[in-house]
Amino acid sequence: MDNNILVNEINRLKKEKNACILAHNYQVPEVQDIADIVGDSFTLSRAAAKMDNEVIVFCGVKFMAESAKILSPNKRVLLPSKYAGCPLAECIDKDELIMEKQKYPDAAVVCYINSSTEVKAISDICCTSSNAVKVIESINKNKILFVPDENLASFIAEKVTDKEIIPWEGGHCITHARITIGDVKKAKSDHPKAEMLVHPEVSKVIRDNADFVGSTSQIINYAKNSQNSEFIIGTEMGVLHKMKNDNPKKKFHLLSSKLVCQNMKMTTLKEVHSSLLNTEHEIFVPEEIRLKALNSLEKMLEIR
């Protein structure tokens, strides 16, 4: 079945099953193009919770689909590629976090949205890359145990200097961690007039060489509103599709050809079609755990 036929069939099934399709910014272009909404993971989950659709097809990775299920327990949430996981989210589990909490009994536990439902359920509050600093500032404890991304933890520590940020050692996004200072020097040499925009999941040495550090959505908005016309993008390559579509007169260069998340690239049109057709790879979250995880998400949403 070629792509045009697949797209037509996906659109037909979407209406038939009262489904909405969500695609993360890092998905392949053809999947982004058939989505009802394209965005960051938690933005998508919140949007889906407000929609009337009975089925959510989440084109992303497992923890994202789980977040959608946490917010929309009465909807069916489908993950088109059942093997699309996130190594960062998987680098800490519930038992490991329990042991870590015992080492720092007086610390508040903050988990990044890129974590499992079980980890969210035993954390005090959740955060995203865009609101992490604000979340940490809102906590009235001096010690913060932050899991699982140590690079985001170090970024927060630079911004919130009155608190001790204790990171989960070794936790990082394997895609963002591939960037080297050599990549930065080459990109800046090749594109001397370009601004460099990077995600806070990159290492400190990369952030220190950037013109702007922000979440995927913040990077997209910065480029859109900037007077500059050329940018070096230091996050997963999928975001270039939207940035180029939104800004046809501007130039975008990927900081490194290594910025490819294989898990994000697992989802294809064929899998979206199969998931809709057969209602397969449904996400289930036990209600007791869901309610505890929801609490950490709702606490985050209370912060303005």
Image (cartoon, rainbow, N blue to C red):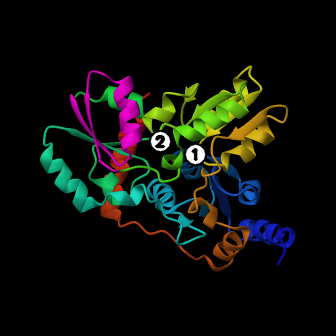
Vertical side of 282 occupied by 101: above or below: above
Q: Earlier in the sequence, mark 1 or mark 2?
A: 1
Chain part drawn in magenta: 141-170
Judged from the image, the secondary structure of the residue bearing numbered disc 2 is: loop
- Is disc 1 surrounded by few (<14), some (14 to 19) or many (20+) residues within 10 Å? many
Residue depicted at 83% across the width and 69% down the height: 3
* Viewer-nearest residue: 186 or 65: 186
Residue 153, above or below 157: below
Q: Could you tell me if residue 218 is visible in this image?
A: no
Label 1 sits on a secondary structure element that is loop
Which sits in the foreground, 277 or 141? 141
Which residue has dot 1 on it? 40
Query: Residue 201: which disc?
Result: 2
Disc 1 versus disc 2: nearer the observer:
2
Kind of residue at disc 1: Asp
Which of the labelled discs sits on residue 208, or is there none?
none
